[in-house]
Image: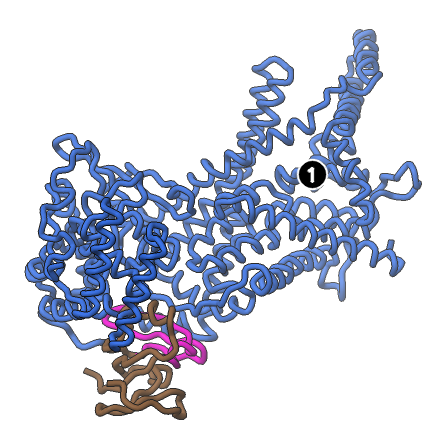
Chain colours: A blue, B brown
Amino acid sequence: MDQHSPTGGGSPAPGAAPARDTLLVAIAGNPNVGKTTVFNQLTGLRQKVGNYPGITVERKTGYLSAPDGRRIEVVDVPGTYNLHPKALDEEVAYRVLIGAIEGGRTPDLAVCVVDAANLERNLYLVCQILDLGLPTVVALNMMDAAEGAGMEIDVERLSRDLAVPVIPMVASKGSGVAELKEAVIGPPPPCPPRRWHLEPQVQQEVDALSERLGTELPDLTPAQRFVDALRAVAHEGAAFFETHHDQAFWEEVKNARRRLAEAGVPYEQAGVCGRYAWITPLVRKAITHQQQAKLTASDRVDAVTTHPVVGPLIFLLLLMLIFQSVFTAAVPLMDGIDLGVSALSEWLEQALPAGMLTSLLVDGVVAGFGAVVIFLPQILILFFFLGLMEDSGYMARAAFIMDRLMKRFGMSGRSVVPLVSSFACAVPGIMATRNIENHRDRLVTILVAPLLTCSARLPVYTLLIGAFVPQAYILGIFGYQGTVLLALYLMGILFAVLAGTILRRFVIRGKPSPFIIELPPYRAPRLRDVLFQMVERAWLFVTRAGAIIISISIVLWFLASFPDTGGKPGLEAARDRLLSAHQARAGGPAASPEAAEELETALAALDGEQARYRVAHSYIGRMGRLIEPAIAPLGFDWKIGVALISSFAAREVAVSALGTIYSIQDADEGSASLRERIRDDVNPQTGKPVFTPLVAYSLMVFYVLACLCMSTLAIVKRETNSWRWPLFMLGYMTVLAYVASLVTYQGGRLLGLG
Amino acid sequence: MQGQRHKHQHGICCRGPEGPCIPLASIKVSQEAVITSFDALNGEASRLRDLGIREGSRVRIILSGPNQMIVAVDQARVGLPRNVADLVLVRHVAPA
C-alpha cells in the first residue's frame, strides 16, 4: 500500500456530495477544549439530550439550518484524548466517528475542536481523525488563552500543513463562530492523504493485515482498514473490531507482533511515535513566537487550592455552601411544588366524579408526578453549582485533592461531590456520579450514596425522636434529641465508608487506577453553558426516572386501594345517623358554631376510622400482616410494615401512612396527636405498647440503612442501564438494615432496655 | 538513549551520554526536565502520553506535595500521584 495515501486520503471526501437530506456533523476534541461551547454556539437552543443506545454516556444532538434549507444534525462527541478507547466515553467517541453508532451513519464532517494553547497534544487527536478518512475542519479554540501565554500561531501555515481548514476561535466570546458555521454549512473539504509514516517493518505488517481485512470486511473503507490493522498490531485497543475478526486473523496479528518483537521494533508505540514525528515539527513551524514558560494566575491559585492542608479545607467550605443551598434554598420551591400538586389533586377531585378512575388519577398518577417534580429544585440547584465548579475548572482540583482519602474507601476523588449531594437527596447525587471516569469507582459511589441520610428521612426521624427521645440536655448544652439526630447522620456516613471498602474489596474488584488528571486553567464560568447543562440533566431525570417513579406510584395506589371492601360495616350508617341528628336539631342549639365543630370532629374521626379500615384490609395492609412475622424480631408490627412498604413511594410517606393507620387526618412529623397515638398504641394480643423507645431506635436504624426509595432505585437503574445493580443495592441495604435493626432491638432487650 | 540501568537512591535510574535519568518525583518545584522513559507503567504510561507527558516532552514542576504532584507540559497542567511520578524517568534540564 502506498505510504502516502494508504487511507484512501486524497480522494474526494466521503461526505463531499451526500445524498441524505440531513448532514451529520460530529464535534470532537480533547476534554476541556470548549467543545460544548462550540456545540452550543452552533446549535443554540435546538438541542436534545439523551443517552447513546444501551449505554449511559450522554448523547447531545442539535440542529443547524443551512440557508438552502438543508438541516444539519450536530452531535457533541464525548471528549477524548485519542481514539484508542479505554473508557466508556472514549469508546463512544470512537464509535461515533467510525459510524458504528448513530444508526450506522458515518459523520459527513468532523469538527475537531483544538486548544490553541496546547496545540501539539490536541493535534494528535486531529491526526487520528484524519486517519479515519473523515472530512475535517479544525476549530482552533481558545486563541485568547494562547495569546495570553505569549504564543503566536500562524493559522494559515497550520492549515496548509494539515491540509484542512483551520478556523481560529474564541468560542466563549462568539469569535470565529460565523466562520465555523460557514465551514460546516459549505461543502465538506476533501480528506487529505496520511502524511505521517510508520516504521517500514510495522507498515509492512499493517499493510498485510489491512489487505486481509479488505477481503474479509469489504464494507470497511481503506482508511478504516488501515486504522483497524494498526490498532490490532499496536494494541491500541481493538474492542470494536475484535468482534468482527475471526481467530485466524488474530493468529496473524500474533505472528506479526512476534516478528516485530524479534526484530526489536517497538510496535506498541508505532502509531504514537509516527504521529508525533509528524506533529511536533509541524507545530514548531506554526508557532511563530512563544514566551518562556512562566507561572500563571491558575498556578498561583493552585498553590492554595491544591495545598495538602488548605485545599481540603477550602473544598469542605464550598461543599458546605452547596449543601446548605441544596438543603435550604430548595425548600420553598419544593413546598411550592407540593402546594401546586395538592391544589391540582383537590381540583381534580372536585371536577371529576368520585370513583376508582378519579382515585387512580389523583392518588396514582398525580401523586407519582408530584414525587418526580418535587426533586427538581434540589436537582436544579445542585447541578447549577456542579456546573459552576466544572466550568470554572475547580472540580478537577477538588477531585485531585480528595482522591487519596477516597481511595481508602474504594472510591475516587470525584466521588466526594455526589456523596455530599446525597445528604440532600440520593437522586441528584447518583446523577452527579457521571463525572467519575472509572467505572468501578462510579459503581461503588452509586451503591453507597443512598446510605447517606437524605432529607426525606428527616420527617420519620423527627416524628420518632419527638415521640421517644426526651427533651433533656447533656451537660446543659447538648440536647438528647439533637444528639440522636447527629448519631443517625454519622451512622449513615460510617456505613457508607464501610460498604464502599467492602464492595470494592469483595464485589466490584479491580486494581484501583492511579488518578491522573488534567487540571484546566481557571476561568469565569459561562452562565449560558452552566444553565444549559442544568436544564438538560433535570430533563433527563424527569423523562427517564420519572416514568419509573410514576409506574411504581400507580402500583402502590393499587395495593392501597384494592380489594374494595366497601368500607367498615356500620360506619356509613353511623355517619348517616350523625348527619340526620344534626339536621333534626337544625333549628335548635345544633346550629351553633360549637355544634357544627363537634359534628366536623365526629365526621373526621369516622373518616379516619374508615381510611384505617380500608388500609388494614387492602393488599398493602395484607402485605403488612404478611411481613409481620419477618419484621417482628425487629420489634415492628404490621402497621410499621405498612409504613415501610409505603416508604417506597417516598420515605416521608411513612409518616402519612402511620397517620392513616392511626386515624390522624393530615398527619405530619410535627403532629402531636400522631406522636401521642403511636406512644399510646397497645398490642391487643400482648397488652404491651407497640412502640417503645427501643422499637423507635430499631426503626430509625432501619431507615438509616434500608433503601426505601423507588426514585433511588429508578435512577440507579437508569444510570447503570440494568436492573442488576438496583436489585443488588436493594438486597444488600435491606440485609444490612435488617441485621442492624435486629441487633439494636434484640441487643436492647437483652440489656433490659425493651 | 536509555543507557545502563541500575538501582539508585531515588529508585530506578539510567545513565546515558546526556547525564543521569532520575524519577520525576525527585524534581523540585519550578525545575524543568525532559521525559526519557516510563518504568513499569503500562496503562498509566498511555494515560500520561494522552495528556502530553511522553518521551521527549519537557515538563516543569508546579507543585510537589507529599502524595501528589502537578506538572506543566506546554500550557497544560497535569496532576498525578507521587508513586506514578516515581516511575517516570526524566533528565534534569536548565530552564529554557
Judge whether residue A426 is colored magenta. no
Q: Nearer the viewer, residue A83 or A325?
A: A83
In the image, farthest residue toward the front: A248
Can residue A474 be spotted in the picture? yes
What percent of the width, then of the height, locates residue A281?
A: 12, 71
In the image, the segment drawn in magenta is B61-87
Tell me what residue is drawn at x 47 percent, y 54 percent: A433
Q: Nearer the viewer, residue A19 or B24?
A: A19
Tell me what residue is drawn at x 37 percent, y 43 percent: A52
What percent of the width, then of the height, locates residue A489?
A: 64, 57
Q: Residues within 10 Å of mark 1 (few under 14, many from 20)?
A: many
Identify the residue under disc 1. A645
**Disc 1 secondary structure class:** helix
Q: Quadrant of the N terminus of chain A?
A: bottom left
Left-right relation of A731 to A177: right
Left-right relation of A396 to A256: right
Where residue A355 sits, quadrant-wise, is: top right
Q: Chain of mark 1?
A: A
Judge whether residue B80 is colored magenta. yes
Where residue A44 sits, quadrant-wise, is: top left
Q: Nearer the viewer, residue A583 or A400?
A: A400
Left-right relation of A113 to A314: left
Q: Is residue A135 above or below residue A124?
A: above
What percent of the width, then of the height, locates residue A306?
A: 41, 71
Left-right relation of A646 to B80: right
Where residue A255 sits, quadrant-wise, is: bottom left
Which kind of residue does numbered mark 1 sit on?
A: Ile
What percent of the width, then of the height, locates residue A112?
A: 21, 53
